[in-house]
Image: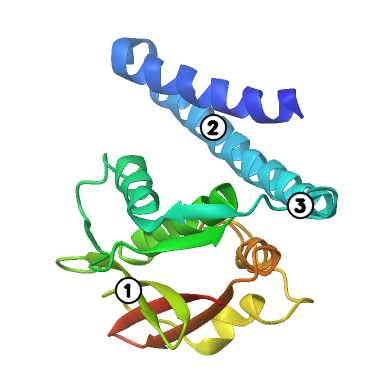
Amino acid sequence: MNHDLRSPVSNLIHFLHLQKESPELLDEESKKRLENKTILGAENLLTSMEDILLWSKGQMENFAPKMKKVAVNSLFEDTSKHFSSEEKVAITFENIENIEITTDENYLKTIIRNLTGNAIKALDKTEHPTIQWKAWQENNQTFLSITDNGIGATQDQFKALYDDNEVVGIQTGLGLHLIRDLAKAIDCKIEVKSNLKEGTTFTLIFP
C-alpha cells in the first residue's frame, strides 16, 4: 500500500520539478513519455485510493463514534482553515444561534470537508462561484446545510446517499456512499435538493 501511494506521487513531483527547473533537458519525445507515465501513475493512484476507501468502509464496523458536544463554530472554523487556499470560490458561514451539536467531531468534520470539496469541484465552470454553510435549529432538531450555485444534478446522481447497494467512486471527492455511512454512524440524516443550472443544497439533520 505504501508503494502504491508513494510511487505515483513521487513520479509526479519529479516530473513537475524537472519541467520547472530544467526544461531544457526535455525534448518532445522525453516530455511526451514522462507525461504519459505521469498520467498512468495518477490513474493508478486514484484506483489505489478507491481500494483503500472501500477497505476503510469495511473497517468502520470495528470503530464506534465518540459522541460529545461540539460547537458548530469550531466546525466552520476548521472548514474555513482547511480550504483557506481556495481562491476562486467564495465560502461563507452562518451560525447566528451559536449552536452546539452532540456528535462525533471527527466523523462530522470529515463529512463537512468532503461535501465542501465536492461542491468546489462542482463549481469548476460557474461564474462567481459561491458556497454557503448555514446552521439553525427548528422543531427540536439541528440543521447544517451547504448550498452552491453550480450547475446542479439529477436526483439519480445522488442515489448512493440513500441506496446501501449503490457505490460511487472518488473522482469527485469522497464517495457519497462513505459520506452516507459516516452520517448513519452518528445518527445524522442527509437530504439533497438540486435544480439544474441553479445549484445544490445538502442538509444534515440531527435529532
Mark toward the start of the polypeptide (3 vs 1): 3
Q: Secondary structure at mark 2?
A: helix
- Which of these two is toward me, 89 or 3? 89
Which disc number belongs to residue 38? Answer: 2
Query: CB of mark 2 within 8 Å of CB of mark 1?
Result: no
Amino acid under label 1?
A: Thr
Look at 36% across and 64% down and name the residue there: 99
Can you give x and y, in whole percent of width and height, for residue 140 in the image? 47, 83
Q: From the viewer's perspective, is the residue at label 2 or at label 1 nearer? A: 1
Mark toward the start of the polypeptide (2 vs 1): 2
Q: Which residue is mark 1?
A: 147
Label 2 Cα crowd, 10 Å radius (few <14 / some 14-19 / many 20+): many
Look at 32% across and 74% down and name the residue there: 147
Look at 84% across and 55% down and name the residue there: 61
- Which of these two is toward me, 65 or 190? 65
Q: Quadrant of residue 82?
A: top left
Q: Where 129 sits versus 1, above or below?
A: below
Determine whether, in the image, residue 190 is placed left or right of residue 31.
Answer: right
Determine whether, in the image, residue 158 is placed left or right of residue 56.
Answer: left
Q: Where, quadrant-wise, is the N terminus in this rendering?
A: top right
Q: Quadrant of residue 20?
A: top left
Can you give x and y, in whole percent of width and height, for residue 16 in the image? 40, 23
Mark toward the start of the polypeptide (2 vs 3): 2
Q: Which residue is mark 3?
A: 64
- Which of these two is toward me, 20 or 128? 128
Its colouring scheme is rainbow
Label 1 Cα crowd, 10 Å radius (few <14 / some 14-19 / many 20+): many
